[in-house]
């Protein structure tokens, strides 16, 4: 029977396919998987690079104890896109530039969101913030100079 005789190229191709499959399986088993913190950092980076901006409102900012003993700094915010209201939260523990004590509820903020997935949104990331310092402060003049009383009012049409 001729089916039991294998040629050299058939044996070489079988060895190549088996080694490729075993290499792929080994890579899938032993590869380093990203941690949840790395996944969140990649999400923030993606939204900073390609997210759209919309105005939102800060609802609350406070610390929440986690199950593993850590304290999470959370921002709660809402925004409207295309007539749909979204209320979201963001863990800003990894972003060191945010102090939840200084964040005031009820203030407007800027939200970055993913256009095809609007519930994927952030207010703060590394190198970008949608938080506003507060309401604009206009200069106050304590003693303005008095108006010049020597000037005669101009009459329109006459010299």
Image: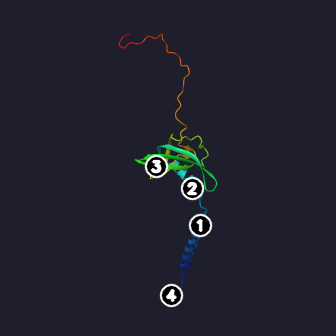
Contact check, label 2 and label 4, Cβ < 8 Å = no
Q: Nearer the viewer, residue 100 or 52?
A: 100
**Residue linked to disc 3:** 86
Q: CA distance from mark 4 to mark 3?
A: 70 Å
Between disc 3 and disc 2, the foreground one is: 3
Say the numbered circle drawn on residue 2: 4
Mark sitting earlier along the chain (2/1): 1
Q: Secondary structure at mark 3?
A: strand
Q: CA distance from mark 4 to mark 1?
A: 38 Å
Say the numbered circle drawn on residue 38: none
As displayed, is residue 145 above or below residue 1?
A: above
Q: CA distance from mark 3 to mark 2?
A: 22 Å
Between disc 4 and disc 3, the foreground one is: 3
Position of 57 compared to 28: left or right?
A: left
**Residue linked to disc 1:** 27
Using a 10 Å C-alpha cutoff, classify the residue at mark 1 as few (fewer than 14 neighbours), some (14 to 19) or many (20 or more).
Answer: few
Q: Secondary structure at mark 4?
A: helix
**Residue at image point 46% right, 11% down:** 151
Q: Nearer the viewer, residue 18 or 63?
A: 63
As displayed, is residue 8 above or below residue 79?
A: below
Q: CA distance from mark 2 to mark 4?
A: 55 Å
């Amino acid at each position: 029977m001729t089916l039991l005789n294998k040629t050299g190229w058939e044996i070489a191709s079988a060895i190549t396919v088996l080694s490729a499959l075993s290499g792929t399986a080994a890579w899938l088993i032993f590869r380093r998987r990203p941690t949840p913190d790395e996944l969140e950092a990649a999400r923030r980076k993606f939204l900073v690079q390609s997210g759209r901006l919309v105005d939102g409102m800060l609802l609350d900012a406070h610390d929440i104890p986690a199950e593993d003993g850590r304290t999470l700094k959370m921002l709660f915010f809402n925004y409207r896109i295309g007539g749909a209201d979204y209320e979201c939260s963001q863990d800003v523990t990894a972003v060191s530039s945010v102090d939840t004590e200084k964040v005031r509820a009820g203030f407007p903020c800027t939200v970055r969101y993913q256009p095809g997935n609007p519930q994927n949104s952030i207010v703060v990331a590394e190198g970008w913030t949608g938080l506003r310092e507060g309401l604009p402060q206009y200069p106050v003049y304590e003693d303005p100079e008095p108006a010049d009383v020597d000037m005669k009012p101009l009459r329109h049409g006459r010299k």
